[in-house]
Each structure stands twice: as C-alpha cells, then as structure tokens.
Image (spheres, rainbow, N blue to C red):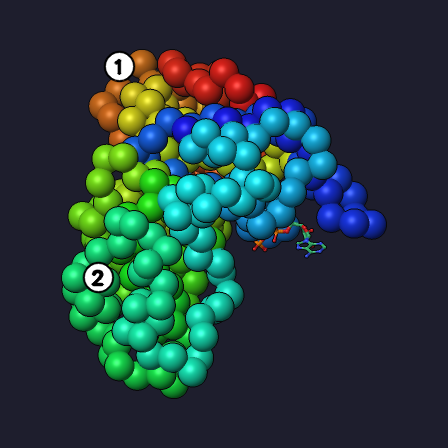
Amino acid sequence: MIQVQNLDFSYPKKPQLFSKLNWESSTGNIIGMLGKNGAGKSSFLRILAGLLFPDNGQLSVLGFSPEERASAFLQEVFFVPNENYLPGHLSAERYRQILQPFYPRFDGETFSQLLDRFEVNSQEKIKNLSFGQQKKVGLAMALSSGCALILLDEPTNGLDISGKSAFRKELISVLSEDQTVIIATHLIRDLENTLDRVMILDQGQIKLDADLSDLADSLHFGISQSAVPDAIFSQSSALGVQFIQARTTQAQTVVNLELLFEGVTSGVPIASFLSKTNSLTT
Ligand SMILES: Nc1ncnc2c1ncn2[C@@H]1O[C@H](COP(=O)(O)OP(=O)(O)OP(=O)(O)O)[C@@H](O)[C@H]1O
C-alpha cells in the first residue's frame, strides 16, 4: 500500500533529512512512528500526503505518486497536522458539510457521535473552541473520513486524560480493516495498547519497523535491582534497571515502547533479534 524506495529529501539550504530511506507497509494497521524532535516525522507524513516532494527515489501510496495529487488519491488520504488548521469562523458541523463531499465514504453520523464522545459542541464556532477541542474536531473528521490512509501528526498533543482515552478507544472501534493509520508521536505512552506496529525514525533512516506481536514474541522486557548480564539493552530508572533480553523460555511481557525507543536510538540492533523484519528497512 505504501512503498518508499531510496527516498532523499532536504529542505532548501538545510542538511539532508532523509537519505535513501526505504519502507513499505501493507493495509490495515495502526502504525506508530516514533522519533526524536526534528527526526523528520512530520516531514515524512507530509511527503506521504503529497504536501512535500522528495528530491529523489520512488514513492507509491495507494498506487499513486503523491506529488501528482490526483483527485482519486486525495479523496483516500486524510492528514491531520500537529498544529490546528481548521477555519475558525465556521462551526465543526458547518465545516463537516463543506468537507464531506470530497470524501466519498465520509460518515456524518460517526462524526456527530465522535464529537459527542469527545464532548465538543458541534455548533460552536471553531475559533471559540480550546486548542484540545479543536484538535478533537480534526481527529473526528479523520476518523469519520472513511479514507484508506489516515495520517495523524501528534494526535494526543493537547488532549486531556479523558480525551486521550476516548481517542484510543474510538481509534480502535471506528476503523475498518482496509484502513491504515500512521501516527507520528513522541508521546509514546499515550498510544500504549493501541498500535499494531511501530517504526522508529532516526538520523534519516527507519531504524526499526516491527509488529507489536513480533516484538512481544521475540523480546523480553523486565526490571531488575542489579545489572542483567545478557541484556540487549538496559537503562537505570528510579525503579531499578529496565532491560530488554532476547526472549527464549520467558513468559511474554508487555512491550515497553519507551525502552525500545531508547535502545534503538542508541544504536542497539534490536531488529536482528526479531523473527520477522521488514526487508526494506536498514
Ligand atoms: N518548512 C521547513 N523549512 C525548513 N526546515 C524545516 C521545515 N520544517 C521542518 N524543518 C526541519 O526539518 C527537520 C525535521 O522536522 P520535522 O518537523 O519533520 O521533525 P519531527 O520529527 O516532526 O519533529 P517534532 O517531534 O519536534 O515535531 C528539523 O530539523 C526542522 O528544523
């Protein structure tokens, strides 16, 4: 569904952001894209959405070249940026009426239900809504759009605790199997138990791309009061030494995404311990 091959990208007069970046994805996943500040998460989403153009390389999204911005492509891709972008002079309901015709599978009833669930007044002018409430309008639009590809940049940024919880629940319940969501975030904990897959973007490359089920099968996450000799990666914390081991006979553990992220971005070749890895990533 998405194929990225040897993609180079830089902003004018800036160092190269992506160099020969490779990645591919099939349909029907909630994918978390993790990366440090400035790693290029937003830029990558914008490239997939056809809002930024690669310098070199091949890019296919839903069978289209995003930069051509074909109408058949645009009606299947919904991008929610980190910053609020909605027209302040309209109510959410009015904006929905204007936007809906561009998305053939948009579900107006789901949109109203989501706004109720998110406790946002659909008749209020958007400029009179708080930052978090405006964010919820954008997310409700995306989840009602019916698009094959939904790109969310830092969706939980600005949401309160109940908003984050409602977002997680609705994300899982509203989506159908033929929809893919890519969520760029550094608020990893907000997405616990939600992701099917995680990719880690670091230093212009995708350093890890794995199913959560494969991570849980192949790795053991633990905490110890002393150093763990055969740990792949370990890190001291207030509670003790958090560690990752290759899993052999141990019981399955919950994947500690924060620890995984620290391990991968400090150069540990975690992918080599997994049973299945995406052949296109480094
Ligand atoms: N419009 C722009 N013009 C020039 N440089 C830019 C532009 N947008 C982003 N950059 C630069 O590109 C790099 C990647 O930025 P990007 O916003 O994609 O990263 P990010 O991983 O989303 O970061 P964050 O987690 O802080 O949101 C940064 O060094 C940033 O300064």
Q: Position of residue 227 (x, y in %)?
A: 46, 30
Please, is residue 100 above or below residue 124 in the view? above
Label 2, residues with CA under 10 Å away: few <14, some 14-19, many ≥20: some
* Marks 1 and 2, how far apart at CA: 49 Å
Residue at disc 2, secondary structure: helix
Which one is nearer the viewer's eye here, 133 or 12? Answer: 12
Q: Is residue 242 visible?
A: no
Residue at image location 79% in from the left, 49% down from the top: 12
Q: Quadrant of the C terminus?
A: top right
Q: Residue at point 43% right, 33% down?
A: 62
Horizontal and vertical percent position of residue 238: 42, 50
Give the residue pinned by disc 2. 108
Q: Position of residue 180 (x, y in %)?
A: 34, 39
For the N terminus, the image quarter is top left
Residue 121 figure quarter: bottom left
Q: Which residue type does callout 2 highlight?
A: Gly
Mark 1, residue position? 249
Sequence-earlier tag: 1 or 2: 2
